[in-house]
Image (spheres, helix red, strand yellow):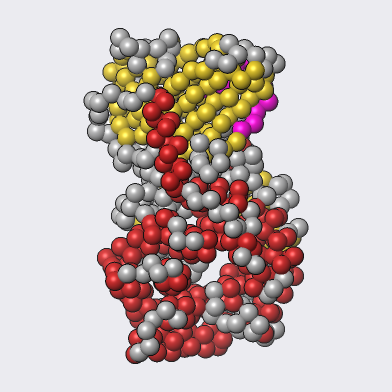
Amino acid sequence: MSAVAPHALRDYALLADGERGVLVGPRGEYAWMCFPRWHDEAVFSALIGGESVYSIFPRERFVWGGYYEPGTLIWRSRWTTESGVVECREALVAPAHASRAVIVRRVEALEGEASLQVVLRPGGGFDRYGLSRLRKREDGCWTAHLGEERLRWQGGGRAELEQEAGEPKALRLEIALEAGESHDFVLAIERPHGEEELPAPDALWRKTEEWWREQVPPLADTAAPRDARHAYAVMAGLTGSAGGMVAAATTSLPERAKRGRNFDYRYVWIRDQSYAGQAVARAGAHPLLDRALGFVTARLLEHGSSLAPAYTVTGDPVPAERQIELPGYPGGCDIVGNWVRRQFQLDVFGEALLLFAAAAARDHLDGDRWRAAELAAEAIASRRGEPEAGIWELEPKRWTHSLLICSAGLRALAAHAPAGEMRARWLALADELLAEASRIGLHPSGRWQRAESDPRLDASLLLAAVRGAVPADDPRSLQTLAAVEEELTEDGYCFRYQAQDQPLGDAEGAFLLCGFWMCLAHAQQDEPTRAVAWFERNRAACGPPGLLSEEFDVRQRQLRGNLPQAFVHALLLECAAVLGSG
């Protein structure tokens, strides 16, 4: 049984440095962290039923709150107790080191006295490895090994060792602070083992603050600068040194309890990466645009038409699915790896072209990126007739959305290409794809449908107009928008499609991504009031830390699925940029 009971997803905050992340719960518990990178094994796994955790919380009864320092993922857990108010400021130190994670935590009694309990119980390899070779140095720093990792902990010199069956399991400490007093903790996890001394806490805080100042732009011209900056900070925190942005920080968080819908999203989806780059480009030529371009370009140059839908942050293949023998988050299980590695998804080539076109509009498309764009266009030409899994990664078909988004990508990039044979070829191919989509994907009512053999409606078909495959005033665009609003929405949220023979909302939650697409669609139709309503409703589907998941359970008002979901934050940023420019 887990040492810490899990919370509703809305209550977790994220610390991140680009290479890995920590989920922090209301009791100051680090319930999730993988090391050395996102897709590696966890050292804190209480989120999915493990016993490993690192917590700091008041001993008295308390009410929890918290907030991010603006434009950062520096989090402040805040507890109002019977005696006063205490905060814990915490962050993963940045810039990140590929083989070393450093976490700083500073607890401070803001009002009255504070009595806190600190527990450090790590577990390497999803709890397969406990503490070994544990010792305390003369300076009070604890050192230990954790499987292949080495651990150093400063600030807990008075901690007592907790054992089970004669084996060290945890370090436990109680501290008391007078009003105005603070106490620092520094935890370093390394592979291979470093010998250099860690800088003082103040120096670690300064470098982390400076890194975030450099990462996150003001975004003052967006419709909601605070939330736009927060979305950008989340994406920056999820983006590794090679430019890849993981789809989410977590694995195995259920989209529907006991339905088998548990996935590992700790990898870089080319589609999601393209969404992020397009969103950033709408807001300005900011650093995340070049990082997205760099990752997608490298994968296309390496793999061309064999481009996989997803990779690890290091550009390697996504591992196969397996279970790790933990209980899982309630309602879910314990899956790592992802079966997407076996799929072909045509639409990712269209999304890559839209990314390259957005970069060209910002004058950020150099020789290698142009070559990658040419490879994406060639892949569309050579593989357009193959059955594929599409945007929602379903059974192979010829999905209408994929044809339309590839047409949109070809048109968008052709607008930036010099006149000549290549430009003419791209435009001709875009026309052919649109004609094919109209042949197999047009419903008798005049709206787009999912596939020739599937007449249902799909919210992704809104993108045909939003991304420029067809004009916004095309009857197919107007019919699709009206149908989506009529058939796939509830209480200001949008579902991606209706499952066979089930009422809307029974099979899965609303997709926040689709809600933001509705915002863009109405903005394109010059309906600002309706666009703003969709934006406001969907950006508010979060908890106090402001993190958004993939799905939102409209009836229970709960987040569902892995957290935070990067492409939802990307679309929040894009909507804020579009509405701010209107």
**Of residues 47 and 299, the one drawn nearer to the viewer in this rendering:** 299
Whether residue 203 is situated above or below residue 469 in the rendered picture: above
Name the residue located 58 percent from the left edge and 16 percent from the top edge.
Answer: 180
Residue 52 rendering spot, x and y as whole percentages: 45, 28
Q: Is residue 425 visible?
A: no
Residue 128 rendering spot, x and y as whole percentages: 36, 30
User: The C terminus appears in which quarter of the rendering?
Assistant: bottom right
Magenta stretch: dominant secondary structure: strand
Residue 334 rendering spot, x and y as whole percentages: 47, 42
Q: Is residue 65 magenta-colored?
A: yes
Q: Is residue 121 visible?
A: yes
Name the residue located 32 percent from the left edge and 35 percent from the top edge.
Answer: 100
Name the residue located 35 percent from the left edge and 17 percent from the top edge.
Answer: 142
- Region in magenta: 56-66
Whether residue 139 is situated above or below residue 23 in the rendered picture: above
Whether residue 272 is situated above or below residue 467 in the rendered picture: above
Query: In the picture provided, is 60 more to the left or to the right than 73?
Result: right
